Image (spheres, helix red, strand yellow):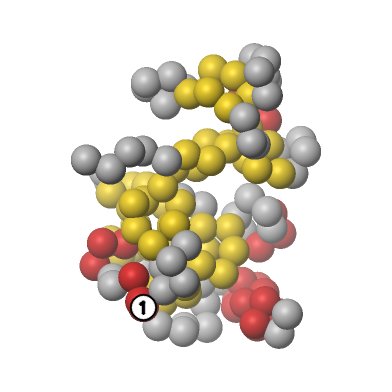
Amino acid sequence: MKPLKFRVWNNIKKEWAKDFTLSQEGELLSYGGIVFNKDNLEISFSSGKKDKNDKEIFNGDLVLIFNSKSPCNVEFQEGCFMLSDDHNWQPLSSFYSNSLEIVDNIYENNKIFYTGNPMTEFVHELKGR
C-alpha cells in the first residue's frame, strides 16, 4: 500500500504550507507548529497517479488530456478521483499517465476556477510562458 500524500494551501498567505500535522482521520491539527484557523486552509490529497512529466496529481489540479485545449479539474467524487470538464465526469484511473499533463491548480490561480471558456484562454497563456 502506498503512503497517503497531502498538501495544504494557505488561503491567507497564498502559498503551500511546509509544516503541518494531520490526524489519522485527515483532520488538520496544526500548521507551522500552532493550531490555526482551519477555515483559511485547504487540504489537497494525492491521487497516487502521475502525469506525463512525472508530477504527482492532487485534487484541485488542472489537467490537460491528450493536449486538449480545455483543462479538467481533478476532484474526489463518489469514492474515486474524477476529471471534470464543462459536461462530463471521467475516472482519472481510465487515463494513462502519458496522456495527462498538469497545467496548474485551482488554489494558486483563484481567478481560473472551473468555468469553461476562460480556462481555455488561460491554458493558451500558460503555454506561451
Whether 55 is drawn above or below 8: the answer is below
Using the image as rendered, state which of residue 38 and residue 4 is in the foreground: 4
Using the image as rendered, state which of residue 15 and residue 79 is in the foreground: 15
Residue 73: in sight, yes or no?
no
Secondary element at tag 1: helix
Task: Check the picture and name the quadrant holding the C terminus.
Answer: bottom right
User: Label 1: how many residues lie within 10 Å, few (<14), some (14-19) or many (20+)?
Assistant: some
Toward the right, the furthest residue is: 13
Whether 126 is drawn above or below 114: the answer is below
Toward the top, the furthest residue is: 35
Answer with the quarter of the image where residue 8 lies: top right
19 relative position to 21: left or right:
right
Whether 15 is drawn above or below 36: the answer is below
Residue 52 is situated, as x and y percent measured from the top left of the image, at 41, 73
117 relative position to 13: left or right:
left
Name the residue located 39 percent from the left edge and 62 percent from the top edge: 50
Residue 22 is situated, as x and y percent measured from the top left of the image, at 48, 23
Task: Check the picture and name the quadrant holding the N terminus.
Answer: top left
Name the residue located 34 percent from the left edge and 58 percent from the top edge: 49
Total numbered circles: 1
Whether 35 is drawn above or below 93: the answer is above
Residue 18 is situated, as x and y percent measured from the top left of the image, at 64, 36
Residue 8: in sight, yes or no?
yes
Residue 74 is situated, as x and y percent measured from the top left of the image, at 43, 57
Name the residue located 58 percent from the left edge and 58 percent from the top edge: 105
Using the image as rendered, state which of residue 51 and residue 62 is in the foreground: 51
For mark 1, what is the residue?
A: 99
Using the image as rendered, state which of residue 112 and residue 14 is in the foreground: 14
Name the residue located 28 percent from the left edge and 71 percent from the top edge: 95
Q: Which residue type carries mark 1?
A: Ser
